[in-house]
Amino acid sequence: MVKRDPAQGIRDVQHFGEEGGVVPVIDHAVTSTFLKPDDMERVFRGELTGCYLYSRHSNPTVMAFGKKLAAMEGMPAAFGVASGMAAIHSAVMQIMLGGGHMVSSRTIYGGTWALFQNILPKFSVQTTFVDPQNLQEWEAAIRPDTRLLYVETLSNPLLGAADLKALGVLAKKHGLQFVVDNTFTPVLISPAEFGADVVVYSCTKYISGSSDLIAGAIVGSEEFIAGLMDVNQGLVMLQGPVMDPRVAYELYSRLDHLPLRMRAHSEAAQILAERLTQEGVLNLSYPGLSNHPQHSLLQSMLNKGYGFGGMLTLDLGSLEKALHLARRLQEEKFGLFAVSLGFTRTLMSCPSASTSSEIPVEEQLQMGLTPGLLRLSIGLVGDPHVMADRFIRCYREIESI
Ligand code: PLP
């Protein structure tokens, strides 16, 4: 079967601006005029759909971004929201309204873990966390009141790849909704191909690419996305974490070069990972290396030509050593010590002491997250070989400590 190319999906969406402009206008209007006043009541009653009403319900620029993202993803519809957390919370709770049980991978972003562990139980939603690689554990955790399976395609921060196909089959077998956070692998992997019902993104990361805005998106069926905007039952409409049209315009434009950027991130990370391997750097994890435990699985899921992504980890054995290396790398202008990822420049952080610190230490160790783990989001600016030279020089210095 010929794989669908997400870049072509993006290419085939075109919104004209006023007077045929090559880009859409930013529609700032908070509220829209009804030329036939009787229609307003019909919209509120749910009898008339597809109308612009009020910007918390729908906005033309946000809808244009959603259309382009959905085309990239190969799914029917998408909706922009205020952050990645807003996307996860709204999508999960729209399915879990009324309470019940869900099964989630244990190795997920710390904020998502804390949402599922600390907040959702207060809304009668219980989560069982499982080893993402152990299918028996997933199936054994399913209960009569389970409604949803949740996973990150490539996990934050451990870079374990989920077997989306097997999980998609499991979800269908038990009549569950399958929600996938694809934040680390936009364009590289299209989770809908493997049975995902809903895909969520932190657009703050690769989709923005510039670390200058916070945003999220939910991709799914027409019905699911319309449900989020329902005036009586929609969690985005009623909780209100909507995307600003100015942000939607930025993301709409940036989607055009997302495939090129993903390819460049992957190339730079692959070069660094191979150079470090040749230099005998130990405890390096990169999905594009054949020693990555899910290298072949990933190969079977990847869209052609975009590589294995820009994320790489290195275990230095202790937090002190990891921080020391990060400091030297920052001094040598290899990267910036900052949380987040998907930026044009390399970003480095120690997840156990930052973005995964919400997860108790025992749980961190259970999932294999050690204090000395340094997470690198490899940037696309500069010659990757020069960057690799800098890295190796700093690594050799701290080896002797
Ligand atoms: N999902 C993943 C995998 C993340 O890494 C993050 C943030 O780091 C989020 C979701 C949350 O995104 P945001 O910061 O845009 O709310």
Image (spheres, rainbow, N blue to C red):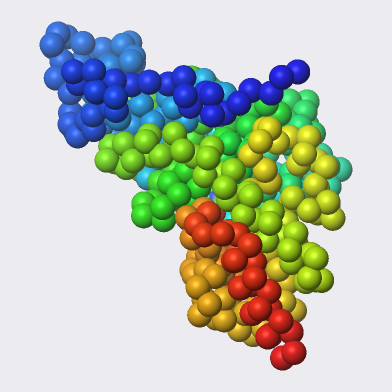
Does residue 273 lie above or below 14 as drawn? below
Left or right: 49 as drawn, with respect to 74: left
Is residue 341 among the parts visible in the rendering?
no
Q: Quadrant of residue 55?
A: top left
What residue is at 54 percent from the left and 37 percent from the top?
259
Which percent across, then down, holds residue 240? 33, 41
Which percent across, then down, holds residue 71? 50, 24
Left or right: 353 as drawn, with respect to 153: left
Front residue of 301/173: it is 301
Q: Which quadrant is home to the N terminus? A: top right
Is residue 306 among the parts visible in the rendering?
yes
Front residue of 358/74: it is 74
Q: How many marks?
A: 0
Does residue 387 lie above or below 219 as drawn? below
Left or right: 140 as drawn, with respect to 397: right
What residue is at 57 percent from the left and 32 percent from the top?
198
Q: Residue furthest bottom?
A: 401
Q: Quadrant of residue 249?
A: top left
Which percent across, then down, holds residue 53? 23, 23
Front residue of 95/369: it is 369
Front residue of 377/236: it is 377
Q: Which quadrant is home to the C terminus? A: bottom right
Which percent across, then down, holds residue 97? 51, 36
Left or right: 58 as drawn, with respect to 388: left
What residue is at 55 percent from the left and 81 percent from the top?
327
What residue is at 47 percent from the left and 30 percent from the top?
69
